[in-house]
Amino acid sequence: GFQMNIIKYTFLMLLVISMFSCATTSSTLGSPQQGNTYSADYDRVYSEALNAVALLSWEITHSEKDAGIIQAKTPMSLWTYGDKVTIRLTDLNDGNIRVDVSSGTNQAVDWGKNNANINNFYTKLNALVR
């Protein structure tokens, strides 16, 4: 009857909302916090960036040293299905390497996880490079 229709309608609405929920992303690229700059050799910073990803137990999904790109996926948790993290290294040609990080999720709300991913990565990388 009437209650069954309400239950069906509610379930349908939740299904539609979950299917079309937007993605959220945080990034240091183009923001006032222009990533971190390291006074070190490019090869060393790239290598330590890979080590930082491993120490965080993230899965590397793609890496291209020449292009300066590392892509990784964070593990699933109670709060997320796993976030996609992109790390970009730029040789500033003055003895410095800039590292920018972006983190995105396919969920409508990221619960602060994207900024936490970025901060956790920099914390590990800082300890390894500096």
Image (cartoon, grey):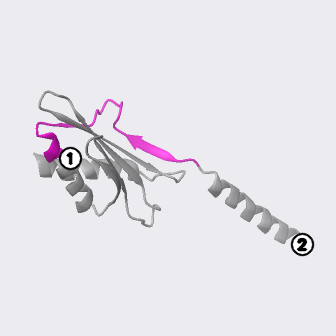
Q: Secondary structure at mark 2?
A: loop
Residue furthest to the front: 66
- Sequence-first tag of 2 and 1: 2
| Horizontal side of residue 49 vs 59, given as left or right | left
Q: Give the magenta part as a residue range.
A: 22-46
- How crowded pointer 2 is (Cα within 10 Å; few <14, some 14-19, many 20+) is rated as few
Residue bearing the label numbered 1: 46
Q: x, y percentage for residue 36?
A: 22, 38
Outermost residue toward the right? 1
Q: Residue at x 38, y 64 (%)?
A: 75
Q: Determine which quarter of the picture holds residue 13.
A: bottom right
Give the labeled residue for mark 2: 1
Task: State the residue at coordinates (29%, 64%).
Answer: 57
Asked which quadrant contains residue 5, the reply is bottom right
- The structure residue drawn at horizontal position 36% and vertical position 47%, both measured from the top left corner, is 86
Q: State the count of labels.
A: 2
- The verdict on residue 44 being magenta is yes
Instruction: Report the mark closest to the observer, 2 or 1.
Output: 1
Q: Position of residue 115 (x, y in %)?
A: 36, 47
Disc 2/disc 1 C-alpha distance (Å): 63 Å
